[in-house]
Image (cartoon, helix red, strand yellow):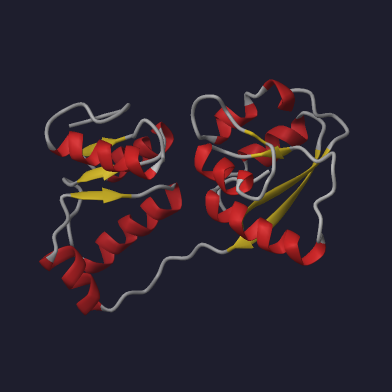
């Protein structure tokens, strides 16, 4: 089970080290179409939510409702939400988390921050995880730049609520996390049209 495209790519890299040929009988799950695409490109048959790209959507799959006694490997970062692991364990599965990358808040030089946030002055900002949003908020506080009136593209309603609580006044959840849909959402929302679910303009 992979929680993001990057987690899926890292998982496949690790698998190539240990399994020259992937064993049969393993069920593969992806949180969203982007993650499923990475796994499918390796010749794997992947299960994913028919709609949505959140942990909640994945956990709603019928095949994950009865998992007592099953062993599940969860490919993810070293921190983040525990909803998938906790829910599957509550349903009786044995879940092993495999941290494949580490998230951290980068430390940019003040000159770089000035160029990006001051000189460039973005009209829209894409923050596709709660951790990315937290880093953006920390960056604003550290640099003195006020980006809270810019259009913020977030991946889900729960992240939108965090953005609102932090002081952002304009946010939007795209219809999917595919690159084309994110671009269309930014373009449509900046143009004054409805660019996706969860708009707040």
Q: Is residue 62 above or below residue 120?
A: above
Query: Would you say 102 lies left or right of 132 here?
Result: right
Measured as percent of width and height from the top left, residue 109 is found at: 28, 79
- Residue at the far right in the pictured view: 69
Q: Is residue 86 above or below residue 126?
A: above
- Residue at the far top in the pictured view: 62
Q: Quadrant of the C terminus?
A: top left
Measured as percent of width and height from the top left, residue 32 is found at: 53, 37
Q: For residue 78, which quarter of the picture?
A: bottom right
Residue 42 visible: yes
Measured as percent of width and height from the top left, residue 3 is found at: 59, 45
Identified at 23% across, 71% down, the residue is 113
- Given residues 100 and 86, the one toward you in this image is 100
Q: Count every numbered label the image shows and give the total.
A: 0
Query: Would you say 191 lies left or right of 91 here?
Result: left
Identified at 81% across, 59% down, the residue is 19
Identified at 59% across, 63% down, the residue is 101
Q: For residue 56, which quarter of the picture?
A: top right
Q: For residue 190, which quarter of the picture?
A: top left
Q: Is residue 145 above or below residue 74?
A: below
Identified at 31% across, 49% down, the residue is 126
- Given residues 200 and 185, the one toward you in this image is 185
Query: Would you say 165 lies left or right of 46 here?
Result: left
Residue 99 visible: no
- Given residues 45 and 163, the one toward you in this image is 45
Q: Quadrant of the N terminus?
A: top right
């Amino acid at each position: 089970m992979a929680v993001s495209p990057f987690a899926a790519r890292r998982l496949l890299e690790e698998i190539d080290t240990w399994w020259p040929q992937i064993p049969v009988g393993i069920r593969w799950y992806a949180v969203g179409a982007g993650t499923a695409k990475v796994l499918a490109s390796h010749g794997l048959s992947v299960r994913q939510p028919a709609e949505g790209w959140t942990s909640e959507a994945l956990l709603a799959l019928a095949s994950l409702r009865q998992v007592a006694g099953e062993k599940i490997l969860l490919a993810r970062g070293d921190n983040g939400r525990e909803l998938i692991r906790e829910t599957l364990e509550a349903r009786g599965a044995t879940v092993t988390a495999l941290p494949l990358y580490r998230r951290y808040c980068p430390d940019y030089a003040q000159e770089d921050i000035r160029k990006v946030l001051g000189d460039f002055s973005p009209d829209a900002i894409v923050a596709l995880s709660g951790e990315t949003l937290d880093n953006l908020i920390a960056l604003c506080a550290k640099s003195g730049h006020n980006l809270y009136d810019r259009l913020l593209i977030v991946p889900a309603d729960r992240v939108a609520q965090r953005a609102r609580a932090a002081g952002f006044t304009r946010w939007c959840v795209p219809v999917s996390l595919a690159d084309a849909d994110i671009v269309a959402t930014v373009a449509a929302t900046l143009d004054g049209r409805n660019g996706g679910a969860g708009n707040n303009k």
